[in-house]
């Protein structure tokens, strides 16, 4: 629900809190990047994990879906708690849980146990994502918020670049279990840094005092607000397309097109670098174009890449056509994500934790739905991945067009 105070903040000049610093943005980016690290680092190991645990590709992909469901459901708890207790307590407890779950994953005896532990890993790690977004909303408004979220993507974008590369190198030295040991160490280092360097950005007088009933009312108000829901769905559908790529690409690129784990990690890094590049382009031009137009540009880019992927799969085109389609789909998230987030949170400063949580829930639920769908194609994993990406991109484009029409209506009325 939107208060008069929130509306004033949203419509005023963009604001940057004096407590914001480059170092703090780097830390927030690292917090946001922890979950991409958990998602992406073990991707080169998926085929070997499947064989080692005597599993199927669809069951192995459920370890990714379980992580995403954990990330989604955990935010429902972490977001409202951060509005009530402050930003620091939920993120510190969550990081500790992430470390413990990662250690458990390293010793999982079968795929069923691994699926459960990946859920716990996501549930605990969700606090890092939701608190990082809420802290940005505490410190920035308007175009300044869009630029700050784009800056976070510069830092968190390094995770998708480095994660598969690190994972591939870890596989040279050990098995997929070693990947989770590395994740546990990364979580422990981030826990220590957050304990020392993250300030409390939600003053006691701004905290909410309601319990479960209040939280449900806030979530209900957000779901009824098109200004929150439509850009959230646009960004969430963009994430769903990317997660379909994340889940399907190890099999499409390594097993169908014959890439090695190291070559696959290089392709993954190239796509992530494109995401970072476009996020920084967004940061530089958003003050001139506005976030709504950049959101639409990203959705059009994603739909173009998805179309190319469907054509490449249906016509059995060579690998370069697939790579071009993938780089367009993944890169487009650099335009869609920061601007969709800024638009969705703009009018919800007093409930930034809950709004950030619900935004994350919808994003990761869509991602969790998309990920296992890519494994339904059997020998035609390329076609099932392409169709899933195309469906998600179509939703993102429809929502982005709705945001654009709303902005144009407001401008004409003004």
Image (tube, rainbow, N blue to C red):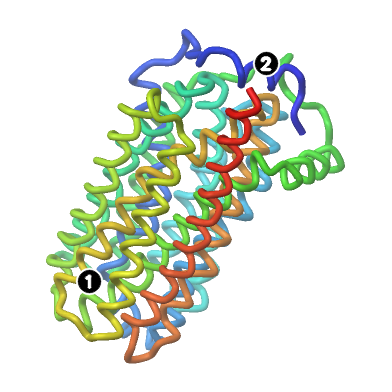
Q: Residue at x 47, y 11 (%)?
A: 19
Instruction: Please provide percent x and percent y for residue 21.
Output: 38, 16
Question: Is 80 placed left or right of 221 in the picture?
Answer: left
Question: Is 125 placed left or right of 245 in the picture?
Answer: right
Q: In this view, does 230 lie above or below 56?
A: above
Residue 48 in view (yes/no): no
Toward the bottom, the furthest residue is: 379
* Quarter of the figure with residue 86: top right
Q: Residue at x 52, y 65 (%)?
A: 368
Instruction: Please provide percent x and percent y for residue 362.
Output: 60, 54
Mark 1 packing: few (<14 Cα in 10 Å), some, or many (20+)?
many
Instruction: Please provide percent x and percent y for residue 191.
Output: 43, 36
Q: Name the residue under label 1.
A: 322
Toward the top, the furthest residue is: 18
Mark 2 packing: few (<14 Cα in 10 Å), some, or many (20+)?
few
Q: Which residue is drawn at 24% across and 40% down?
A: 277
Toward the right, the furthest residue is: 213
Q: Name the residue under label 2.
A: 8
Instruction: Please provide percent x and percent y for residue 225.
Output: 72, 41
Label 2 – label 1 distance at C-alpha: 47 Å
Of callouts 2 and 1, which one flags the residue occurring earlier in the amino acid sequence?
Answer: 2
* Quarter of the figure with residue 31: top left
Give the structural element (helix, strand or loop) at label 2: helix
Question: Is 332 placed left or right of 12 in the picture?
Answer: left
- The label on residue 414 is none
């Amino acid at each position: 629900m939107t208060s008069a105070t929130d509306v004033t903040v949203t419509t005023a000049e963009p604001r940057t809190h004096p407590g914001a610093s480059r170092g703090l943005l780097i830390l927030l980016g690292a917090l946001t990047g922890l979950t991409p690290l958990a998602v992406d680092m073990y991707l080169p190991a998926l085929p070997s994990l499947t064989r080692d645990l005597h599993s199927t590709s669809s069951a192995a992909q459920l370890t990714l879906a379980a992580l995403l469901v954990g990330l989604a459901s955990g935010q429902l708890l972490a977001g409202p708690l951060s509005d009530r207790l402050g930003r620091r307590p939920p993120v510190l407890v969550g990081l500790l849980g992430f470390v413990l779950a990662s250690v458990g994953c390293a010793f999982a005896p079968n795929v069923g146990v691994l699926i459960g532990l990946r859920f716990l890993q996501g549930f605990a790690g969700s606090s890092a994502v939701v608190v990082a977004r809420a802290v940005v909303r505490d410190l920035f408004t308007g175009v300044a918020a869009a630029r700050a979220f784009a800056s976070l993507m510069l830092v968190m974008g390094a995770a998708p670049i480095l994660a598969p590369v690190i994972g591939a190198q870890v596989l040279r030295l050990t098995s997929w279990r070693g990947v989770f040991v590395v994740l546990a160490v990364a979580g422990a280092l981030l826990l220590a840094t957050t304990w020392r360097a993250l300030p409390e950005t939600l003053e006691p007088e701004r905290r909410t005092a309601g319990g479960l009933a209040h939280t449900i009312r806030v979530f209900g108000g957000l779901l009824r607000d098109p200004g929150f829901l439509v850009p959230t769905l646009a960004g969430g559908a963009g994430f769903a397309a990317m997660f379909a790529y994340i889940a399907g690409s190890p099999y499409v690129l390594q097993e169908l097109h014959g890439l090695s784990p190291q070559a696959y990690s290089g392709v993954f890094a190239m796509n992530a670098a494109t995401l970072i590049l476009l996020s920084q382009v967004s940061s530089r031009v958003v003050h001139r174009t506005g976030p709504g137009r950049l959101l639409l540009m990203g959705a059009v880019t994603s739909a173009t890449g998805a179309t190319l992927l469907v054509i490449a799969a249906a016509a059995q085109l060579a690998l370069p056509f697939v790579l071009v389609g993938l780089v367009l789909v993944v890169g487009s998230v650099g335009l869609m994500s920061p601007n969709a987030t800024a638009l969705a949170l703009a009018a919800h400063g007093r409930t930034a934790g809950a709004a950030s949580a619900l935004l994350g829930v919808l994003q990761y639920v869509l991602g969790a739905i998309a990920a296992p769908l890519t494994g339904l194609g059997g020998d035609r994993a390329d076609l099932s991945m392409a169709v899933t990406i195309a469906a998600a991109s179509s939703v993102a484009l429809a929502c982005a067009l709705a945001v654009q029409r709303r902005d144009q209506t407001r401008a004409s009325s003004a």
